[in-house]
Image (spheres, grey):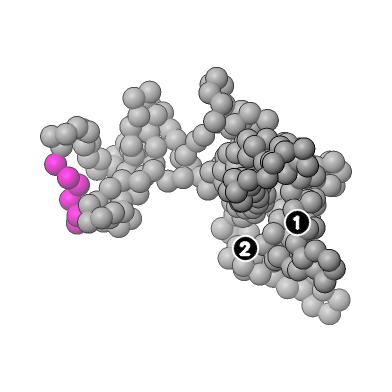
């Protein structure tokens, strides 16, 4: 799929901001070279909004960087991880094209193969890791602050709050039980193709994160073979479909004509 539409966590229109700020003490600071630096004594929990040229206001928070106070727009990590997965996949396709002719028996081998292979394999691993991380981030974002997960055991019932779910419940249990219980939607149960591709993604991701060596003739050939045969396009498409199944129009293809 095409690269996604990039968004921050909280974007509102000018009219929405005016309604939100009614009755509140709001300070407007014009941007420009002559604008004095922000006061370092700004409260740590001060909520700011950066106004764009198109009239969108992005919720931001203060942070001191290199001794200077700045307002940083709050990101949506899930979308950034997903976008990073797409970027790494795009690079891996480019590096694959450069690598394959150099390992063909009909060509002369050169020292360039070292750099080409490092570029190819690191970008494929990056794509898989970022895509899986975006999925984990998305599921955690669905868990409400006041939600409690009930886990029925043979001799007891365990109850987990949001923080405990995020830290102590496995990915498999979270996606198969927690999210369906929380939302009332068992998306994987009704979409077996999505489930199969997410299972494949997790298997590949685990083989990278928890890299294990073989005792056979080759030590790490299983990971490399997987990198050449894995269906990245389908994995990206199915993860997007899963997310949109719980948040309508969350993952959207960008309407621009740029290819990046």
The residue wearing badge 1 is 223
Quadrant where the image shows the C terminus: top right
Report the side of 40 relative to 239 (left or right).
left
| Prevailing secondary structure of the magenta residues | loop
Give the structural element (helix, strand or loop) at label 1.
Answer: helix
Name the one closer to the observer, 172 or 216.
216
Residue 37, position as x, y percentages in the image:
17, 45
Residue 220 in magenta? no
Residue positioned 31% across, 51% down in the render: 62
Which portion, as a residue range, is magenta?
Answer: 36-42
Give the structural element (helix, strand or loop) at label 2.
Answer: helix
- Closer to the camera: disc 1 or disc 2? 1
Determine which quarter of the picture holds residue 1.
Answer: top right
Report the side of 248 relative to 104 (left or right).
left
Name the one closer to the observer, 227 or 236.
227
The residue wearing badge 2 is 166
Tell me the distance, in whole angstroms, between the alpha carbons under discs 1 and 2. 28 Å
Q: Residues within 10 Å of mark 1 (few under 14, many from 20)?
A: some
Q: Residues within 10 Å of mark 2 (few under 14, many from 20)?
A: some
Name the one closer to the observer, 21 or 130.
130
Residue positioned 70% across, 66% down in the render: 210
- Can you see residue 58? yes
- Can you see residue 123? no
Q: Earlier in the sequence, mark 1 or mark 2?
A: 2
Residue 120, position as x, y percentages in the image:
64, 45
Considering only vertical position in the picture, is 1 above or below 121?
above
Residue 186 tag number: none
Residue positioned 47% across, 39% down in the render: 8
Determine which quarter of the picture holds residue 248.
Answer: top right
């Amino acid at each position: 799929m095409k690269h996604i539409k990039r968004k921050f966590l909280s974007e509102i229109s000018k009219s929405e901001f005016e309604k939100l700020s009614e009755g509140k003490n709001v300070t407007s600071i014009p941007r420009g070279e002559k604008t004095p630096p922000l006061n370092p004594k700004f409260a740590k929990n001060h909520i700011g909004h950066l106004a764009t040229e198109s009239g969108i206001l992005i919720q931001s928070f203060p942070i001191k960087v290199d001794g200077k106070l700045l307002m940083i727009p709050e990101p949506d990590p899930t979308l950034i991880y997903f976008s990073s997965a797409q970027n790494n996949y795009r690079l891996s396709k480019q590096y694959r094209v450069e690598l394959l002719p150099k390992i063909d028996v009909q060509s002369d081998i050169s020292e360039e193969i070292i750099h080409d292979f490092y570029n190819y394999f690191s970008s494929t691993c990056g794509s898989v890791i970022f895509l899986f991380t975006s999925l984990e981030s998305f599921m955690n974002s669905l868990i409400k602050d006041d939600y409690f997960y009930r886990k029925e055991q043979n001799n007891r019932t365990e109850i987990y709050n949001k923080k405990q779910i995020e830290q102590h419940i496995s990915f498999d249990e979270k996606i198969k039980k927690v999210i369906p219980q929380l939302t009332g939607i068992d998306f994987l149960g009704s979409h077996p193709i999505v489930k199969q591709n997410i299972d494949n993604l997790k298997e590949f991701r685990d083989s990278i994160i928890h890299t294990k060596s073989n005792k056979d003739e080759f030590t790490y050939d299983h990971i490399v073979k997987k990198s050449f045969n894995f269906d990245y396009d389908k994995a990206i498409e199915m993860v997007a479909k899963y997310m949109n199944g719980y948040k309508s129009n969350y993952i959207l293809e960008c309407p621009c004509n740029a290819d990046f």
